[in-house]
Image (cartoon, rainbow, N blue to C red):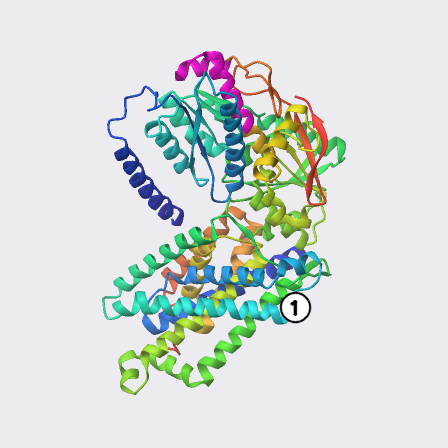
């Protein structure tokens, strides 16, 4: 049983990372009906922004001296990475999606794939394709609870993810920006007629989604130890499946989907075979598309952002 | 699917690059690899970037050191030697492309490469078809030289390497039950795991569980958790350094305190960068121990350090040996025709290499002894030597 609980805990922390990334997919889809394939690279760039800022802040020295990296510096790293990704996300929207916004829906989709490939290869050029160890922004502390080994990293991942999601919920439901986002997702033209600055609202959506992806990137690095410029490919795809599973365009759905995918992956890897850990995600995708294409929580016209 | 997408684009790029290359030298002279000058051209294909970049880079540094030394001493057969290195990025389709390009565009007389067995297999098939002699410095999977009579190697084979670690685990570490964690996308890892299992079970040990991962994976917590749930006393991980480093960290994080063991795929400085203190008290079999070495090896280590300011790895030492064995064969052949080089290579006997005496046997493999290294204080140190 303790082994099962261990797998569940590992699955939950992985799942909350997927959930953070899935939120970006689902928010953009909710507003523009666009699957932003470049999102997985925004996630990757966020992880690298965290890597470099932690290095500049002298994490190597703190690690060698065996001290803890100060929490306020860890927050600086997080904020910096989120800012870099937010700027990147907004820039991508401005340069690659806005010019083709009125074109048929296939056009921006193809542009998105182009941007994704461009960023992946730029990443390999700039960051080099060698795997890098992620700096221990959170110093690892282990403790045993009834045969289960917990680390503060797993807990941090879970807590940070939940806090960010609560923040997002408040933003969408309690602020004017959130109200504008919801309005735009219901009907872009009508929202414009009501005096909403739709371009700004869309930019805000990209900024928020990309910031969450960057947080996901840092947590991913902490959890998975190494990062590479192609880390976004599979992780992004799984997060996308998570968004579809929960009901694309639906915020609680993305969170639920992320956690379910993370759990499914970990349990299949632990109890069936690790060779099927990637396959299970896509089996779930096929099943959900056949049985319930709108996703678990995707009721027709729920609150969509 | 995504891999397919990437490979496809890579292939496209390679094609374009190859056609540009072909344009630069119009009307290349048939198959006679004489080159424009009187230089002897050697092709080296290696993973200079990617998940196994250290393998390629270390080997290439050592090959270039060997070339510089031989050129400073007057070259081979009175001609200077030039080495052309192409990056295969650790991808087997790219390895085949690189070999084709080295033969067609660069007109090489002989080939060196690869470290990874999967890549030596795909590059070797091209070399064999075009009848250009190739020496793999450090591919240990038996299938590599079975490709054909132009393919050689200067290192030991996995059945032997697996036996070495099995013996060490059973007799020196006194382990009775071991879990295996292998990379199922990697010929080297699968072969070595099998060899270890065979030898270990013959000695009366028990393999309690076999878990697997795929090259490029970053999450190993499920496998390590599953191993934690068994009564294994040690874990054998015949993989490559990037994943091994992550696995060691994962094991530490999950509170698994079993000794880890592996093979020569661990041998790279990045292993320590990624794995850090999680690697303390782990063991791996290797070709060569830099801290206890013969005179020839000491000379190599000093020259390498003087030139590159870093310690060579065992793979580097083998790269150096592969190059010097090739020069020796060319000198004995007296000419640089592929067939003559091949025949001379096959007759290599008791060549004094950095990694020990090299004799090429009937199967074009080298018979050599192996060492076991223990990681202590962030460094690999000599622990035992095992003769064939």
Residue located 30% across and 60% down the image: A111
Dividing the picture into quarters, in which one does residue B338 lie? Answer: top left
Magenta stretch: residue A12 in it?
Answer: no
Q: Is residue B373 shown above or below A258?
A: above
Q: Residues within 10 Å of mark 1 (few under 14, many from 20)?
A: some
Dividing the picture into quarters, in which one does residue B369 lie? Answer: top right
For label 1, the residue is: A70
Instruction: Report the magenta stretch's main SS.
Output: helix
Dividing the picture into quarters, in which one does residue A244 lie? Answer: bottom left
- Tell which of B82 and A69 is nearer to you: B82
Q: Is residue A169 shown above or below A66?
A: below
Magenta segment range?
Answer: B320-346
Residue B204 visible to the viewer: no
Using the image, name the chain to which the residue with label 1 belongs: A
Residue located 38% across and 65% down the image: A292
Tell me if A226 is positioned left or right of B369 in this view: left
Residue B78: x %, y % from top left: 45, 17
- Tell which of B118 and B101 is nearer to you: B101
Q: Residue furthest bottom?
A: A194
Q: Is residue A40 shown above or below B119?
A: below
Residue B46: x %, y % from top left: 46, 35
Magenta stretch: residue B334 in it?
Answer: yes
Q: Is residue B286 shown above or below B110?
A: below
Residue B171: x %, y % from top left: 75, 31
Residue B87: x %, y % from top left: 43, 38
- Tell which of A34 and B368 is nearer to you: B368
């Amino acid at each position: 049983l303790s082994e099962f609980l261990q797998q569940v805990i590992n699955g939950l922390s992985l799942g909350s990372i997927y959930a953070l990334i899935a939120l970006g997919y689902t928010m953009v889809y909710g507003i523009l009906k666009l699957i932003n394939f470049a999102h997985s690279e925004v996630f990757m760039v966020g992880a690298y922004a965290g890597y470099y800022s932690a290095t500049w802040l002298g994490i190597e020295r703190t690690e060698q001296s065996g001290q803890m990296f100060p929490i306020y510096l860890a927050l600086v790293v997080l904020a910096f990475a989120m800012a870099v990704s937010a700027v990147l996300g907004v820039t991508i929207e401005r340069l690659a999606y806005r010019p083709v916004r009125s074109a048929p829906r296939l056009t921006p989709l193809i542009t998105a794939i182009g941007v994704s490939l461009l960023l992946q290869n730029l990443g390999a050029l700039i960051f080099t394709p060698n795997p890098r160890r992620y700096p221990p922004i959170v110093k690892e502390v282990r403790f045993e609870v009834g045969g289960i080994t917990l680390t503060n990293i797993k807990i941090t991942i879970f807590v940070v993810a939940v806090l960010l999601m609560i923040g997002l919920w408040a933003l969408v439901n309690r602020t004017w920006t959130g109200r504008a986002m919801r309005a735009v997702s219901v009907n872009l033209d009508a929202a414009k007629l009501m005096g909403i600055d739709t371009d700004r609202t869309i930019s805000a959506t990209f900024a928020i989604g990309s910031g969450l992806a960057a947080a996901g990137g840092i947590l991913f690095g902490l959890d998975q130890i190494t990062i590479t410029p192609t880390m976004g490919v599979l992780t992004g795809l799984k997060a996308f499946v998570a968004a579809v599973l929960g009901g694309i365009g639906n915020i609680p759905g993305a969170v639920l989907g992320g956690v379910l995918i993370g759990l499914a992956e970990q349990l299949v890897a632990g109890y069936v075979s690790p060779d099927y850990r990637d396959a299970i995600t896509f089996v779930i995708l096929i099943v959900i598309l056949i049985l319930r294409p709108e996703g678990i929580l995707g009721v027709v016209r729920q609150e969509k952002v | 699917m995504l891999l397919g997408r990437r490979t496809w684009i890579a292939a496209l790029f390679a094609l374009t690059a190859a056609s540009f290359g072909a344009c630069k030298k119009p009307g290349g002279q048939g198959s006679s690899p004489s080159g424009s000058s009187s230089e002897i051209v050697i092709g080296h294909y290696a993973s200079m970037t990617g998940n196994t970049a250290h393998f390629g880079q270390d080997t290439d540094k050592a090959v270039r050191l060997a070339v510089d030394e031989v050129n400073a001493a007057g070259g081979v057969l009175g001609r200077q030697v030039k080495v052309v290195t192409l990056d295969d990025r650790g991808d087997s389709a790219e390895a085949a492309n690189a070999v084709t390009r080295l033969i067609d565009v660069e007109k090489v007389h002989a080939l060196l490469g690869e470290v990874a067995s999967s890549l030596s297999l795909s590059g070797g098939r091209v070399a064999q078809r075009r009848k250009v002699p190739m020496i793999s410095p450090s591919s240990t999977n038996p299938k590599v030289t079975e490709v054909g009579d132009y393919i050689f190697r200067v290192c030991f084979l996995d059945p032997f390497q697996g036996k070495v670690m099995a013996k060490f685990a059973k007799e020196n570490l006194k382990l009775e039950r071991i879990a295996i964690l292998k990379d199922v996308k990697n010929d080297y890892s699968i072969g070595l795991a099998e060899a270890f299992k065979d030898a270990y079970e013959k000695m009366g040990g028990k393999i309690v569980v076999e878990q697997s991962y795929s090259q490029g994976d970053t999450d190993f917590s499920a496998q390590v958790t599953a191993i934690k749930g068994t009564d294994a006393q040690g874990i054998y991980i015949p993989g490559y350094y990037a994943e091994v480093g992550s696995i060691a960290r994962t094991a530490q994080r999950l509170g698994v305190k079993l000794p880890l063991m592996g093979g020569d795929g661990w041998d790279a400085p990045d292993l320590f960068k990624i794995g850090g203190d999680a690697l303390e008290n782990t063991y791996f079999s290797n070709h060569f121990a830099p801290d206890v070495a013969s005179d020839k090896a000491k000379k190599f280590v000093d020259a390498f350090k003087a030139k590159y300011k870093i310690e060579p790895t065992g793979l580097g030492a083998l790269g150096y040996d592969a190059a010097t064995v090739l020069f020796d064969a060319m000198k004995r052949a007296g000419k640089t025709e592929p067939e003559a080089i091949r025949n001379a290579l096959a007759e290599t006997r008791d060549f004094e290499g950095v990694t020990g005496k090299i004799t090429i046997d009937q199967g074009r493999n080298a018979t050599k002894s192996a060492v076991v290294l223990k990681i202590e204080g962030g460094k690999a140190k000599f622990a035992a030597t095992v003769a064939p």
